[in-house]
Image (cartoon, helix red, strand yellow):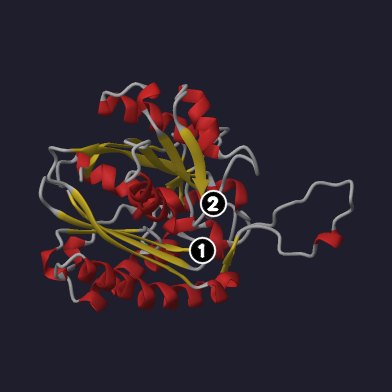
Amino acid sequence: MAAIKIAASAHYVPEKKVTNDDLSQLMDTSDEWISSRTGIHQRHISCGENTADLCTKVAQELLKKSRLTADQLDLIIVATMSPDCYTPATAAIVQGNIQAVNAAAFDVSAACSGFVYALTTAKAMMGLPSYQRVMVIGGEVLSKVIDWTDRTTAVLFGDGAAGVVLENSETTSSKFLSEDLETYGDLADRLQAGSTAPLQKFPANSPHHFEAFKMNGRDVYTFATHKVPLSIETAVKRSGLELEQVDWFILHQANSRIISQIAKRLKQPLAKFPMNIAEYGNTSGASVPLLFDELAEAGQIKAGQIIVLSGFGGGLTVGTQVIKY
């Protein structure tokens, strides 16, 4: 059976940067308050570009880097919690934008775990003969679902997109070794974006409006620091490896304190847990591939290394993938 290789990775973020000092002009906060609690110093915010626009720019760069033409793609999966619309899927818009006429396209909705869930879906589908080249993108414009007067959530999030092209290959030594997906639906109300009001509250002739992002920060912190290490340990054990053999733990960039605590619980050096949250904030489904691509571009990810990708968030969900690069 052919192994799956990552043929290319890419990312794109909007040009506009919003610093913590900028936010202090909108709400009762400060750079010290935000950075000391989250590790975030700034975030990139879209000025008119929607989620499919960001994902399309990533898709175009992925084609260039992988030296593929759009018509060679068999499948496009976009992981997002901030789609352009209910339907069509963001992936379908991207497919049309790049004219990937032979590719099926659909979205995966698993919030900050979405990219890892999408990778796992792609891996399964690539076992079928029809899907040999697959593009997986995580993309978010979270600024459109944020209450910019709520300092408990508005300071956390940024916009961006990133992804990979996967290919079945007879020659590569890289492999997707194992995964672990967990969902805790009984905790769903701890992190929500969208209306939960009964439908009868809305007049029949009016559109259904989403409510802004809401989060129980304390419960989400407890969930992340307890359930994510368990998922990582499970996935690594399934791969037949030990935690000490992992070169990089590429985690969802939710909060620097969470990442530090996960490293402590796993008894692994923090140096193996790279972070870019200071620059981008929490970009939900885009954060894992964005960090992966930055490390790849910098030459820090090398052939033969063992990499753990782990996302966690709304659902509540955790998704962990173990890869030999």
Q: Amino acid at mark 2?
A: Met
Secondary structure under the numbered disc 2 in the rendered image: loop
Q: Amino acid at mark 1?
A: Gly
* Horizontal and vertical percent position of residue 227: 38, 75
Q: Are marks 2 and 1 in contact (CB under 8 Å)?
A: yes
Q: Quadrant of residue 233?
A: bottom left
Which is more toward the observer, 253 or 129? 129
* Horizontal and vertical percent position of residue 121: 40, 51
Within 10 Å of disc 1 (Cα), the crowding (few <14, some 14-19, many 20+) is many
Q: Is residue 321 above or below residue 65?
A: below
* Residue beneath disc 2: 81
Q: Which mark is residue 314?
A: 1
* Horizontal and vertical percent position of residue 167: 27, 37
Seen at 50% across and 68% down, the residue is 316
Compared across the picture, whether 7 is left or right of 214 comes to left
Seen at 60% across and 46% down, the residue is 144
* Horizontal and vertical percent position of residue 135: 37, 37
Q: Is residue 49 above or below residue 193?
A: above
Q: Is residue 244 above or below residue 25?
A: below
Which is more toward the observer, 112 or 43? 112
Alpha carbons under labels 2 and 1: distance apart = 9 Å
Which is more toward the observer, 121 or 108? 121
Compared across the picture, whether 29 is left or right of 118 comes to right
Secondary structure under the numbered disc 1 in the rendered image: loop
